[in-house]
Amino acid sequence: MKTTNRRDFVRGSLTLATGLLLTNKTFADSTLGSKVTSKFKFEKASLNYSYNELEPVIDTATMEIHYVRHYGTYITSANEAIISENVSAAHVKDLFSRISNYSTKLRNNAGGAFNHELFWSILRKPTDNNVPTGQLDQAIRSSFGSFDSFKEQFSKAALGQFGSGWAWLVKDGNQLKIGSTPNQDNPLMNVSPFKGTPILGLDVWEHAYYLNYQNKRADYVDKWWEIVNWEQVEHLYRTSK
């Protein structure tokens, strides 16, 4: 896989901070031969690393299958649902604030598209002593007492999510909160009891780790901290409203 540079990645990826994971482009449902159009669609985010660069934390095969097959299907299916349900929304937060009005297909696949774009953006090559700095570090210490306490609480949320789902760090006003959601739900959805703007998300679906860790989710969560891109998480913290 060809690796993009940071400028291309930022340009190709849509910005979570402004809620523009959906682009304001019209597109036709060519597969059905119809003229139905929508004001936006999900775009597939580029990766800022190649499939093998997250090893040994995430193996090459898992990364490729996850990105190409699973993520690709979420993008395609979400856009199909946007057209078939004649969805009109200004941006992704607008869509998720009314997601209960739409089908399960749109809820699951739009959630999958959004959640994974965030997930890809906050990963990097494995790094020893990988910790946040600056404003984010201060906010974590203020909210949770220490970085170690934050890690413990976040890991507990990831391990405590029964079945498939996500663990989240969200910004809610000036506070940081930890929680989890099932399936492809996220804290921006009106159906989620846990709410806030996600700035860190961990995918705990088995397809995210099973080839390497089998059923040992705890091992996956423990190693995942080595590949968190804290620079990107801090950017989302500073720019999210």
Image (cartoon, grey):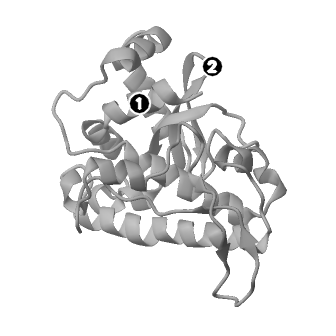
Distance between the Cα atoms at labels 1 and 2? 16 Å
Residue appearing at x 57%, y 17% in the figure: 175
Q: In this view, does 240 lie above or below 211?
A: above
Q: Which of the 4 image quadrants contains residue 34?
A: bottom right
Please state the horizontal and vertical placement of residue 234, each as a whole percent of the image. 39, 27
Q: How crowded is mark 2: few (under 14 residues within 10 Å), some or many (20 or more)?
A: few
Q: Which of the 4 image quadrants contains residue 195?
A: top right
The kind of secondary structure element at disc 2 is: loop
Q: Name the residue under label 1.
A: 235
Q: Quick one: quadrant of the N terminus?
A: bottom left
Q: Mark 2 points at which residue?
A: 173
Give amino acid for label 2: Gly
- Image check: 173 left or right of 86? left
Please state the horizontal and vertical placement of residue 19, each as a whole percent of the image. 60, 42
Residue appearing at x 39%, y 16% in the figure: 135
Please state the horizontal and vertical placement of residue 237, each as a whole percent of the image. 47, 27
Give amino acid for label 1: His
Q: In this view, does 100 lie above or below 167?
A: below
- Image check: 44 left or right of 192? left
Residue appearing at x 31%, y 64% in the figure: 62
